[in-house]
Amino acid sequence: MKQKIPIRVVQIISRFPSTMLQDAINDAPWVQRLSTMRRPLSITSESVLVGALERILLGRRISVSDGVKLYNEASLSGLSALADMIKRSRHGGQIFFNENLHVNTTNICTLACRFCAFRRGSRHSEAYALSPDDFISRIEPFSESIDEVHAVGGLHPMWTVDDYANLFGKVKNRFPKISIKSLTAVEVKHIASRSGISTRRALQILRESGLDSLPGGGAEILVDSVRDRICRGKETSREYLEIHGEAHELGIPTNCTMLFGTVETIEERMTHLQLLREQQDKTGGFQCFVPYPFLPDKTRLPEANIPSSDEVIRMIAISRIMLDNIPHLKAYRMNIGDHLATVAILSGADDIDGTVGREEIMHEAGSRVRTDYNRDQMALLIESTGQIAVKRNTDYSYAMEYRTNVNNIRMELPIAEHG
Ligand code: SF4
């Protein structure tokens, strides 16, 4: 029997803490802590990094042009060091993870985004749509260990808000302690439209039936000219932000994402970050930002500028530096692989994707990352970077240090998974 040592509750965070809001940034405790931290040579030797740090300490924001300059001019080691300082000023040496399960509701989709390897037409031999019983049977084997089910899928041509309300109600009834994180903004838009109601009303109904949070997928790049090239027909940038804002106003926390490395420019990536930051100023419900690069297998974007590993870490670091009002940043290991995820949690990320159980969307596009880790293996992955594993629930309102007994656990990390 493995020895597991949950040590103590280390952090309790209220749902939408005031530190997420812009008016608190000048006086935010993390900025105060940042001002007292020793600056490594990798930062002090580069004026562009010193300038960025000084701006933050003065409570000023890193603009789109500042972000582009950082991306183009700063060294990778310096950027990582600055992002790591900011991460440590917020979370010390803690790295969060959760025990979750991904279940995709359907791969049938009325759209055909060019970066998507997951969707199928309704007559395709691999098309599927889970019934509530199918969905519940997927959760059953994991129900004693997980505290969150992450469920997204395609835009099913027949499903309405009632179908999801029925699904969430049944799942909640069967597993009352499991948090339901489900539906991207475009799914909300789609089922609201199919039901003839507003997205706000759809979110109200879904919340009442058991929906706890939104995962944030589908942001891609929040510049409509880019969206028109890679995901025509999807919600507009404004709609993505509005739907998340409505969720926040209804007390539903959400994550936000960025798919980078398709056809966008560096400036458009920084514009994306700025738009998320502005939305967060208004409604304050983004709890975690999840950036991930495009994976090309089985997709239809031959002109994509697929980022190198260096560029992935550069983007993660700049995200931490610019997003001064979103508390958490996730290393999405399903996409970038375990090795790069461990670099990411030394370069600004404070959260790493969880146990997952099963994953289709990234694996269809080329990911070969393992999906069968338990909590000990997650903790060991984090500890391998010299940091402290903290097991959390969906909305970070509960978090506990989690240490492994390394003598009893052997984990071999697969090599070079980044697609
Ligand atoms: S990304 Fe989502 S909306 Fe776009 S084709 Fe794939 S499943 Fe459909």
Image (cartoon, rainbow, N blue to C red):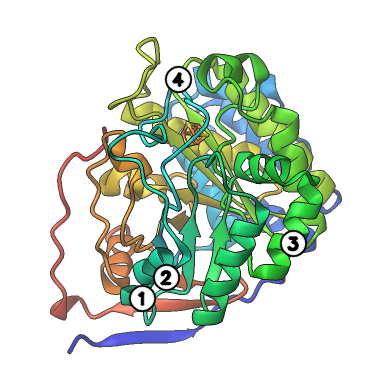
Q: Quadrant of residue 145?
A: bottom left
What is the C-alpha distance between the residues marked 1 and 4? Answer: 37 Å
Which circle, 1 or 4, is nearer the viewer?
Answer: 1
Q: Residue at x 77, y 60 (%)?
A: 204
Q: Amino acid at mark 1?
A: Glu
Q: Which residue is mark 1?
A: 140
Quadrant of the image for the C terminus? top left
Point out which mark residue 262 bears: 4
Q: Name the secondary structure under disc 1.
A: helix
Q: Secondary structure at mark 4?
A: loop
Q: Is residue 70 visible?
A: yes
Residue 332 placement, left or right of 227: left
N-term-proximal mark, 3 vs 4 = 3
Determine contact: label 3, label 2, CB under 8 Å.
Answer: no
Secondary structure under the numbered disc 2 in the rendered image? helix
Instruction: Please provide percent x and percent y for residue 190.
Output: 65, 40
Q: Residues within 10 Å of mark 1 (few under 14, many from 20)?
A: few
Of the pair 350 and 178, the residue shown nearer to us: 178
Between discs 1 and 4, the one toward the N terminus: 1
The residue identified by callout 3 is 205
At horizontal 44% and vertical 77% (from top left) the residue drawn is 401
Indicate the amino acid at tag 2.
Ile
| Residue count near mark 4 (Cα–Cα under 10 Å), binned few <14, some 14–19, many ≥20 | many
Mark carried by residue 136: 2
Question: x, y (%) of residue 351?
Answer: 47, 57
Closer to the observer: label 3 or label 4? 3
